[in-house]
């Protein structure tokens, strides 16, 4: 691929697709069902794949967006006019899919925050308000895409010069500004939740860094707008910056979920190492404490033991409580006797645990599924 613009287009698009596919593959590898955010990611993948093909043709065949100096010194052949008309039409279609991709990514991130805000008193009003704003801004972007040229065929007319509307500067500004506004809304949404967490400041810094990655999308859009407006006659410039934004959005939006999946896997491994031992104890899951029981076989006898572990507060050693001392059973000749021990765990109210040995996590963490990536985002 000799054209560096095409190379960058394919490279950035492939990396974005890889990030989104990694989310879905990891979800299935963790034996979790696809949630709403995952299905929205599938839709975003479809939009990105469609854009890959559309922009390849646009960059190869060109569009009617050329400078006045080029028109003055160049004679368009019938073949070139045909190709540029097709490229111009595909460019318009691409704007629809690209806008859809950006707003789908916003909904993916909003779904992550919805799960973190689950059962909080302001959950519904927050999610509905954000959804309404996202719907309105998305419609505004798509309407602007098709309302700049009148008559409509000027969007793909090559000769004579269709005028300034074919450069779609209004569409560029509207999409850019609304993109910045909605990204900023998503940037500040999780910050109060992180601030309210009772967790070490280093952990809070990690979460702040994770949830404020959206500042990179805002920065790219702010940088892109004046550059694209200055180079309004260059479709290559516009497409290249769009590819950069596409990759950045994929990384920023999927980072919390990928981190949650990784952190959940790390917790599961740590839990397995903590509860299991070399004598064959079948340890329980690690999140939130609980009881584990195991059968130890020694020759023809069986020992039954139950262990309860509590998650410690920071800076305090882990506590393990052994109940029911090992008791040797005689040979059973094929009949195994077991003793069942049920360990109940009671949650204390926040005002009762201040200064106590255990750390209180907010409802949104405890109500999240123990197998979900959202459960792994906030927990250390």
Image: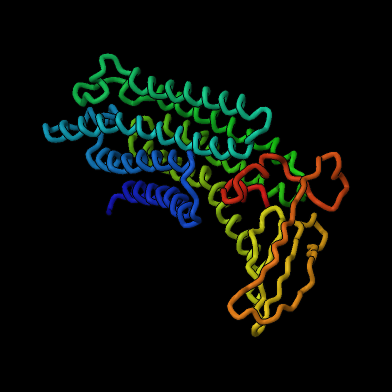
Residue 344 lies, in percent from the top left, at: 74, 52
Q: Residue at x 65, y 68 (%)?
A: 273
Residue 380 lies, in percent from the top left, at: 68, 54
Q: Residue at x 68, y 77 (%)?
A: 302
Nearer to me, 208 or 326: 326
Q: Quadrant of the N terminus?
A: bottom left
Q: Is residue 91 left or right of residue 290?
A: left
Residue 86 lies, in percent from the top left, at: 20, 32
Q: Is residue 21 left or right of residue 81?
A: right
* In this view, 321 is above or below 262: below
Residue 60 lies, in percent from the top left, at: 24, 42
Nearer to me, 247 or 207: 207
Nearer to me, 380 or 202: 380
Q: Residue furthest top?
A: 150
* In this view, 249 is above or below 313: above
* In this view, 348 is above or below 279: above
Q: Is residue 274 visible?
A: no
């Amino acid at each position: 691929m000799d054209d560096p613009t095409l190379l960058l287009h394919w490279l950035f698009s492939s990396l974005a697709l890889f990030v989104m596919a990694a989310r879905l593959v990891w979800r299935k590898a963790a034996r979790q069902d696809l949630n709403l955010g995952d299905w929205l990611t599938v839709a975003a993948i479809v939009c990105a794949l469609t854009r890959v093909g559309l922009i390849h043709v646009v960059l190869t065949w060109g569009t009617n967006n050329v400078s006045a100096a080029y028109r003055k010194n160049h004679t368009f052949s019938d073949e070139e006019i045909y190709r540029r008309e097709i490229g111009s039409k595909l460019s318009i279609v691409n704007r629809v899919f690209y806008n859809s991709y950006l707003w789908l990514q916003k909904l993916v991130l909003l779904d992550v925050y919805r799960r973190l805000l689950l059962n909080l008193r302001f959950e519904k009003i927050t999610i509905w308000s954000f959804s309404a704003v996202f719907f309105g801004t998305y419609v505004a972007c798509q309407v602007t895409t098709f309302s700049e040229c009148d008559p409509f065929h000027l969007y793909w007319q090559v000769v004579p010069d269709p005028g300034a509307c074919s450069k779609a500067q209004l569409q560029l500004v509207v999409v850019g500004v609304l993109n910045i506004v909605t990204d900023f809304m998503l940037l500040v949404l999780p910050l109060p939740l992180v601030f309210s967490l009772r967790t070490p400041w280093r952990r809070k810094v990690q979460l702040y860094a994770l949830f404020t990655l959206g500042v990179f999308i805002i920065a790219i859009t702010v940088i892109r707008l004046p550059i694209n407006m200055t180079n309004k006659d260059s479709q290559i410039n516009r497409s290249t910056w769009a590819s950069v934004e596409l990759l950045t959005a994929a990384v920023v939006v999927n980072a919390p979920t990928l981190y949650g999946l990784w952190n959940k896997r790390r917790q599961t491994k740590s839990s397995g190492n903590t509860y299991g031992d070399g004598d064959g104890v079948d340890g329980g899951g690690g999140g939130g404490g609980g009881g584990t029981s195991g059968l130890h076989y020694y020759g023809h006898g069986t020992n039954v033991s139950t262990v309860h572990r509590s998650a410690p507060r920071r800076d305090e050693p882990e506590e393990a409580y052994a109940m029911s001392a090992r008791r040797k059973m005689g040979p059973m000749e094929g009949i195994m006797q077991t003793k069942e021990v049920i360990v109940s765990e009671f949650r204390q109210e926040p005002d009762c645990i201040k200064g106590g040995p255990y750390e209180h996590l907010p409802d949104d963490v405890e109500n999240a599924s123990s197998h979900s990536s959202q459960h792994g985002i906030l927990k250390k």
